[in-house]
Each structure stands twice: as C-alpha cells, then as structure tokens.
Amino acid sequence: MLDFVSQRKWFFLLSGLIIIAGIIALAISGLKLGIEFSSGTTMNMVFENSVGQGELRTSMADLGYPDAIIQRSSQNAFLLQGLALSPEQSVRDQQEEQLVNSLQTKFNTTIRIVEFGSAGNTTSGNATPGNETLGNWTQGNATAGNATLALILGKPVDPSDLSSELVNLGYTGATINQTTLDSYIVRTRSVSTQEKAQIQQALEQKFGPMNYLDFATITPEVSGQRVKYNIYAIIAATVAILLYMAWAFRKLASPFRYGACAIVALLHDILIMLAVFAIFRIEIDSMFIIAILTIIGFGVNNVIVVFDRLRESKVVESRFDLATRVNMGITETITRSINTSLTVLFTLFALYAFGGSTIHNFILALIVGVIASTYSSLFIAGQLLVSWEQGDFGKLFSWLPIRRKQS
Amino acid sequence: MIRRNSIILVLIIILFALAIAEVLVKNAPSIQGGNPGNNTLGMRLGLDLSGGTRLVYEARLGNETPTAADIRSTINIITRRVDAYGVSEATIQKLGSDQIVVQLPGVRDVEAAINLIGSTAQLDFRELVYDSSGNPTKDENGNLIWIPATAIDSSGQEVALTGQYLKATSKVVFAPNTNAPEVSLEFNSEGANLFEQITRRLFVATDSPSNKPLGIFLDNQLISDPRVNGILSNTSVITNLTLTDARNLAILLNAGALPVTLNGPIERTTVDPTLGTDSIRKSLIAGAIGLALVIAFMVLYYRLPGVLASVALIIYGIVMLALFKLIPVTLTLPGIAGFILSIGMAVDANVLIFERLKEELRSGRTLGVAVETGFNRAWPAIRDSNITTIIACIILYWVGSSLVEPRMQGFALTLGIGVALSMFSAIIITRTFIRLLGGTNVADNLPLFGISKPAQTSNAKEQE
C-alpha cells in the first residue's frame, strides 16, 4: 500500500511553496481586478483613420484621463459607404441587425457593426442644450443615412463575396473597402454617459470618425457592493459546509475536525487559484468568484469521499490508528478521485478549447481549482486530520526552523 | 424484484420520451407559461447570450431615501416606458434598497434607451413674465424667465398645470399641412379646466400682447413654446419635434413621471448580440465534445457499466434540457458552463458506485449482490458530497439574486439542478440498467466489468 500519510510534510511544503509564490506575486503586483470589483470604465474605440497609441494617450490625458490604460489591437473590417439605410434610428437599428444576422449566417463568423460619422452623439453636441428642442435626446437625424458602416469580421472574407451578398440582401450601389481599423481598449476611472459623448466628440475632432465597439462602466459604489456580497457568499458557503460536515461525521470523535480540515483544504484550493491568477496577471471578475464557489463545492465533494471511508463501520471498529485509516481511505478512493477529476477536466478542456474566448479565464480558474482540489483531497485534507491528532502543529510552531531540516 | 425493476425501466423510458418532446417541441409548455425565448430550442436566454445592455440606476429623492413604494412605482413606470419602446423580454428589478437594474436584450441604440429610462419625465406648462412695456423679462444672462402657469382647480386652490393632469392617451400625430410629427395630449377633466383658464388668459390678454406663448417643459427643459391662438380645454399638441423625439415623448407622457430622480447609469455593460450567438454555437460544440470525451473515458475504463452509465448520462442531459425549458431557467454562458460541468460531475456518482461495485465483485460476490451492496456503500458519500455542492449553489444563487446578476444565478441554478438530477440518474437509472443484467450470463463475464484477475486472488492480495 502506498504511504500517503507519513510523508505529509512534503505535501504541505509543496502547497506552501506555491501559495508563498502566489503571496509574493500578490504583494508585488496585486491582483488584477476587473472593473466589476475595482470600478471604472473599459471602452473599445475603433477609428476610421489610423491613430497612434501615443497620440491617443496624449489626447486622453488632455481630456482628464491621465491614468488611462490603453491597449492597442486592430480589427479586420470592411468599410461600407452609400448603403441605403433609414435615417430614423429605430428603423436603422433593425436594418443593421438583419444585415448582421444574414452576413453572420452566410460567412459563419462573428460580425459586428459600427457606424462612423453617424451624427449620433456628435451632432447632438452641436445642438445647444436646454433650448428650443430636445437636443440631447436626438441620436439619429437625417444625415445618418450617409453614415459609413464598418463591418468588423471575426475572420477574413472575400470582398467580392461580401459585395454579392449585399446585393442579394437588396443593398445595391454600396462601395466596399477592405481595411484594418485601429482599435484601442481603454480603461479609465468610471466615465458617465455625458463624458462618453464628450470623449467621442473630442477624439473625432482630432482623429476623425470614431465609435465605441464596447463600452462598460461601473462606479465605485456598485463595485464595492459586489465585493461585499461576494465575500459574504464565500464566508457563508464555508460556514455552511463546516456545519454540514460536522453533522455528517457526528458519529465520529471530534466531528468538527473533519469540517475544519475540509475547509483548510478548500482555502488551500482558493489560495492556489488566486496565486495562479496573481502570478500570470489574469484579470479577476465575477466569473472568478463563481469559479471559487464551484471549487468550494467540488473540493469538499472530493474531501468527503475520502473522509467517507473513515466513518465506515469496518474501519471505525478496526484497531488501526488514524494515520493508517486515513492512508487506507486515500488508497481506496484514489482511483475514483482521479477518474472523477479527469471526467470533469475533459469537459473543462473542451470548454476551454471550443467554448469561446469570453469564458476562457473562468474555465482556466476552474481547471486550476479542480487540479488543486484533487491534490488537496488526496494529499492535504486527510493528512491535516492526522497532524491535528498527533499535535504536529504545536511542534511546528515551537521548532519551526529546525524541523524543516530534520525531515 | 425483476418485475419492479421492469416497471422502473418503463417509467424511465416514458420520462425520456417526455423530455425529448419538451426539448424538441418549440412551443412546449413551461410551468410559468408565457412566451418562450426566440432561439430554436425555445430556451430563455440571458443577456450574455441574447446580447443586450444592463443598466443600473440609483434612485434619489432630494435628501431623503426613497421608500419601497417609490421604487415599486418607479419600476412600474420604467417597465411601461420600455414596453412601449418595443423591447421584448426586458427585465426591470430592484437591487439593494435604492437601485434599479434594467436589462434590455437586443437593444442596439443604448443611448436612446438611456435617455428614455433615466428621464424623470416631469411635464409642466409655464408662461412668461412681462414688464410694463409689454416685453418679456429676462434674467442677467439674457434668458427668458418662465414661471409655472397656474389656475384655480375645482377645490378653489391655485395649482400649476403639469403632466399629472394628462390622460395616458398621448400619441404621435402628423400636422395636416406640414406633415411634421407632433404629440397629441388629452387632459382629464380637472386638467381641461386648468388648461382652459390658462389658454384663455394667454389668448385674450388685457394688459400686453395677446397670443402669448405657452412654454411646455420636460424635466425643466423647454421642448416647445407655441403661441396660444385660441381657447383650448381638453386637448392640445406639442410641436417642433423630430419623429424619434415625438415617439419617445409620447412614451414618456403615457408612462407617467417618475416619483424619484434616477442617477446614473452607475453601471452599464453591453454584450453585442452577435457575440452572444457565437457563444451559443461554441458552447454547443464544446458541450458535445465534452460529453463525447466523458463517454469515451467511461466506456474504455469501466467497460459495460461505462456503456450503461453513458446511456444514463445522455438521458440525464436530455432531461436537464427539458427541465431548463420547463422551469424555465434563463440560460447564460456560465449557466451552459455549469450544465456542461455537471455532466462531468454527474459521472462522479457513477464512478463512486462502479468503484464500489468492482470492490464487491473482486471479493467474489455475484453481480446481483454486488450491485446492491455497491450502491448502498456508495450512497453516503454521494449524498454528502452532492449536498455540499448544492449548499454552495444555493449560496451562489442567493448572491446572484441579491446582486441581480443572472450569470451567477444561471450558473448556480444549472449546476444545482444538475447535481440533484445526477443523484437521481446514478441511483435510479444506472442501477436499473445494471440490475437488468443481473439475471443474464453477462453477469459472469468479469472482464466486461473491467476486472481481469480471478476474483479470489486479487482480493486476497489486497487484504494483506
């Protein structure tokens, strides 16, 4: 029988090292928080004309956003001019939606549409607010029919195919230019709707037509609330699991220890997830919290399967000591633990590889969590139980520096 | 025993058939009734899949905190506005004590929606003040001074004419001569009384010029200032509008003014609808591949029981989809991930049982006995581990509802239902299948169960 228990200090040491590396990474650079938790605005700006990163940075600083983080990317696009679209915003929205849907089906890729110089926010800025008309309401007006549309494509498409498809859809006489558009993901403090329009107006004056591909903003108030609730959730889940486990193992001596060791194993899993995200500077958002809570559920699942063997009557009644019993439990369940984790990992890898980029980081967090929790259920949780019974922790604290070397 | 097992098998087959019907029939009934979603399977889709915008506003009432009743009526008014604007399946919910979350699926023109939702829509009528020489007075900046147009109501009080005296029958009409868009207004009887007094005063002025203008203000912003050319009572029109503005104004007037002011949006996130469509397609592919990998693993590792578990897994998957539609669960990207993850976890119960089954078979028991003891021994671990996962899901769901965060709710709901159903799948479906083998000669063929060595020796070795 393999011995999982007596060598436990090495397992503790390995986990400790990963966690310490994570803590160092956390201390040096901190977690990279998404705007959901740190508040702020991320906007993806697309420009019709070429714009340099430095120029944009200067302009953003001039507009009062000196701390803006600006990331450059470019977009495969087609510029369409002279498309006969309605000047009325609501009608044009529908037309554009139909256009996108048809093209998306035809070319089997993501297609997004951006209007350049559609007079949307730009001309509403020219109307004098507070006088005569509902000036700042007006989004579309008669000039919008002349807007240049940018079709942003997920993969390259032959221009002649696009042209013939447009004719099929009833849009004749449009001029089509294949191009690469400059696009920038800009992250700043939270920007209000008015400020958004002001930024667009100012940048258009300087760089020519520009529009937002994405715009997300969250104020500190909202992000604070999120952080608070998420912390509540993690605490509530932990306490609930501790209590349930104490109840499930109530027939054994000191049932709370089983829950407590399971919780330590879970904290270990969470710390490893945080460590990996801190070391690789991956952004933490709500989805990460979902991943943590899932791993809490999944990890405790693994620990319970191991601990379950400790409460079986034939084991409880045996004359073996706890260390041997824990070792037996791990040996008997290791196949199951690995097999279950493998099946879960299969589905996660499938999601990671084929599930689209929006859930990449979420799935990555789950993959790290599943591996960490499989490890901790086999090499940490039961061993902690033994260490607790044998008073290892007391020894560890009294002779901490020497103890490591002696092993 | 065999008879009872056959009955359960028939019930499983009926359940499976019903589930397939529920999934495939587009307009299959759901418990809540109402409109199913608009994609092919008729599932309800969250914003991250349908595309759309999430807006959060903060309600303020001067220096006071708005009451729950204020928030309720604000939500009602916003709902009427959004409905009239033509957004199907929008949801407007309270968040915390004084915030309102508006989710608008599929809206492309977010700025217009923001103006429509955030506007207090307080309509009022004002008049100018004239000096002794008959010219309207201006403030130090040269702007005209407008004061509320008041009249005597039926109880003898002097009151200002505002939007509260309007019937909810405003609509966009077109001027007969110019074809310009206008919004028609209809006053209730008290409003008609006030409006008549005011128009009479402005039309036949005894002091200075007659045909004075009447200022129509929306949220303290002048939208129209027609000259009064006659004495009017129950109807009027607002002119000088673009078509879009006229349409929005009619919506705002009919929905009524908000009892609070809305700050914000303090949160604003948008998912482009095309990304949503792409995500659904990719998730379906990922789900199919994940399921195939799990089935391949189960069959290769556990042989015959693996095949049975895979059949159980497919039944599980279809029943899950049927439940999503029946309840109905709003599908989100994390929700789909939760579902696919639950496929992986559903296998766990089977794995636990099969490992126990193998142990029992190795110790030389017959299949019939081994199945029963294997299931019974595996049950406490399955129960406890799944209950803890469900606890985590309940908490996740609770946080998701507190934050009005459908992605979190969706994930918690799909994973929670999945885990609960997987217990049923492993305990009822897989067991019934394996029991069916009990009386056949398959039961003697141990390699089919992934056991190669003769039973007694391997068992003896393990005991040492």
Image (cartoon, grey):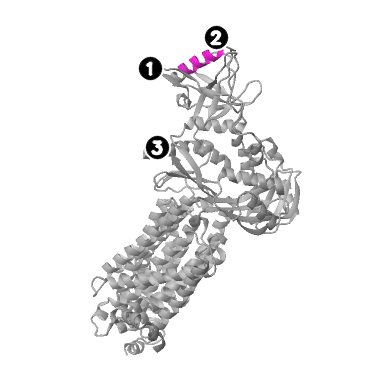
Q: Which disc, if any, is residue B155?
A: 1
Q: Magenta span has A257?
A: no
Percent position of residue B444, x then y: 37, 81
Q: CA distance from mark 1 to mark 3?
A: 27 Å
Q: Which circle's residue, 1 or 3, is located before the other in the chain?
A: 3
Secondary structure of the residue carrying numbered label 3: helix
Secondary structure of the residue carrying numbered label 1: loop
Main SS, magenta region, reads helix
Percent position of residue A296, x then y: 40, 66
Q: Mark 3 falls within which chain?
A: B
x 45%, y 54%: residue: A224
Magenta part of the chain: B193-205
Q: Amino acid at mark 1?
A: Ser
Q: Is residue B1 left or right of residue A115?
A: left
Is residue A360 visible to us here? yes
Q: How many numbered callouts? A: 3
Q: Mark 1 falls within which chain?
A: B
* Residues at marks 1 and 2 on the same chain: yes
Q: Are marks 2 and 3 in contact (CB under 8 Å)?
A: no
Q: Which circle's residue, 1 or 2, is located before the other in the chain?
A: 1
Q: Magenta span has B197?
A: yes
Mark 2 = which residue?
A: B206
B277, B322: nearer the viewer: B277
Disc 1 vs disc 2: which is toward the camera? 2
Is residue B304 visible to us here? no
Disc 2 vs disc 3: which is toward the camera? 2
Q: CA distance from mark 2 to mark 3?
A: 44 Å
Secondary structure of the residue carrying numbered label 2: loop
Q: Mark 2 falls within which chain?
A: B
Mark 3 = which residue?
A: B70
